[in-house]
Image: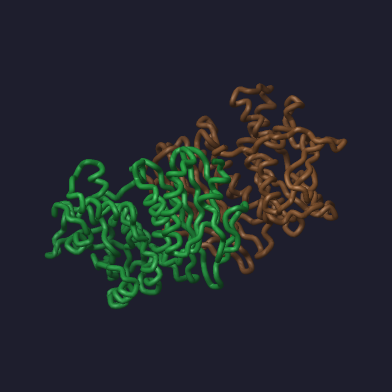
Chain colours: A green, B brown
Amino acid sequence: MGEFELIERYFKRPSQRNVLGVGDDCALLRPGPGMELAVSTDMLVEGRHFLSTVNPRRLGYKSLAVNLSDLAACGAKPLAFTLALSLPAADEAWLAPFAEGLFALADEHGCEVVGGDTTRGPLVIGITVFGEVPTGEALLRSGAHVGDDIWVSGTTGDARVALEVFRGTMSLPSEVFEQARARMELPTPRVALGQALRGVATAAVDISDGLLGDLSHVLRASGVGARIDAEAASSLLDVEVPSERRLEFALSGGDDYELAFTAPAHRRDDVERAARAVHTRVTRIGRIEGERGVRVVDAAGHPVPASFASFDHFG
Amino acid sequence: MGEFELIERYFKRPSQRNVLGVGDDCALLRPGPGMELAVSTDMLVEGRHFLSTVNPRRLGYKSLAVNLSDLAACGAKPLAFTLALSLPAADEAWLAPFAEGLFALADEHGCEVVGGDTTRGPLVIGITVFGEVPTGEALLRSGAHVGDDIWVSGTTGDARVALEVFRGTMSLPSEVFEQARARMELPTPRVALGQALRGVATAAVDISDGLLGDLSHVLRASGVGARIDAEAASSLLDVEVPSERRLEFALSGGDDYELAFTAPAHRRDDVERAARAVHTRVTRIGRIEGERGVRVVDAAGHPVPASFASFDHFG
């Protein structure tokens, strides 16, 4: 099967909202009046971001999910994406389920494919995603203020537990492992929550490299520090693991694709209302402080040693 | 050097025209009033699109050039790009010249980096480029009409000659080889020509897989065929090679990043005026016909056998 036939068969879809889809030199996008276009790009490499044994349907889903998560962190509504694919071979048994998983999530969010590129090479998936957000209303990393609450959506650390099992450093009952594995392979981008938080949250980031690591980008961009409640943070982990590792996994697990965000303390009700409206759990885990750095503290306010490094691809 | 330091050092630049640059979850783009955003994405893989021995400065340049060429084919003005980079190691001796070559071309076109992603893995470069074009004025593949002239910018086939030398199937005097090699490694995206052709050309495509192959996309999208003048097409090759291979290289060489476009015969003067205004050579090589397919003919109108396949990554 040639490159053009491959594109035609698996990735060409009629264009709807956007002007021109796959099949010209460029796609043409027209954000609505008063809208800015939010853009994010991610590259997933076999052996680094996913195992060669991963189910291709789940991989297709996840490849788009991690990109939608960036749009969520900006409060943007998904519009479209481009797909660049390097593949060792044009293997239909892989391509068909990959495309199925990808488009299942794309359709769920009304996000249409508008362009792409395929080539032979190592298995690498490059997606660039486009969303729209009312001008000036995007959630940024730089808006956190002293006194703001720190919130986290959903659960964190579960994907890391699955990774540890794959690495052979932990073992778990099979139903617990499958639960963790689903969190790793089928993360839920918090797209509706991100939009619901526009005008409520002061800053937001998506958690891909670990909660503390990604929160530190917010702290640096905002010129502030944070105090984290260890007990609240430990509750972010969903799966059952030995208690001495709960905090570590929750704070520095990585691959979570949840949102960490800040909001003024007097807007707690608004945060909870926004979260309820989109059926998403949110947990308040700490507070923004003027003193730089992060302090993880127990119920009595005593520091808990927590020097978990965040994930860094070149660390 | 860690991932964030690497991004900071080589790829972070102050944002100018666009709202938000590298360093948040998304970049925010705002096309001007009455403008559409043209988007294109390309992935370059070591061993497939470039040799491991290529000069990293030239590779940085070319990685963006092939994307700008897609904008050129739409008649769009470059605005911004995102860069996703998978690298075997954070090697400064490679990164510094790569970034230099990339930004030299970016600056020449006022095209700023607005986001990116770096990871460890095989050497793969993924760029998504954004341009703007007045609504409804983009050059498409589907606009060619029977009777239109077929034009090509610059020269074609030279990059392929260099590739044949690298493959060991040809040998050339060293200054001829260097000339061909420069065409392969430093292609000139026809950005100014693309914009100058808005309102003049009826269809356009950029030549990446070979002139005939890429022209066939225009023919298919427009529901027409073409007659190509072998003598005019042979003149597209710039370097000196044995005469019996000139036509093959010019028509199916690949990696040219020139524009093939169509325009009404009564607008020849307008095409030539537009090309002169942007100091770009254009050559008229044939005519659009109603009969499907491509016929390559000699000066007497007799068919020349020319079954050169275009390049297909999965062919």
Seen at 14% across and 64% down, the residue is A301
Which of A277 and B115 lies nearest the eye of the viewer? A277
Residue A250 drawn above or below residue B65: below
Residue A75 drawn above or below residue B247: below
Q: Residue furthest right?
A: B300
Asked if residue A236 lies left or right of residue B135, the reply is left
Q: Residue furthest left?
A: A300
- Residue B262 visible in rendering: yes
Which of A84 and B287 lies nearest the eye of the viewer? B287
Which of A288 and B238 lies nearest the eye of the viewer? B238
Number of marks = 0
Percent across and percent down for residue A91 are 46, 41
Percent across and percent down for residue B187 are 64, 40
Asked if residue B80 lies left or right of residue B190, the reply is left
- Residue B276 visible in rendering: no
Image quadrant for the N terminus of chain B?
Answer: top left
Percent across and percent down for residue A312 are 33, 46
Name the quadrant containing residue A53: top left
Residue A52 drawn above or below residue A298: above
Image quadrant for the C terminus of chain B?
Answer: top right
Seen at 53% across and 62% down, the residue is B29
Name the quadrant containing residue A229: bottom left
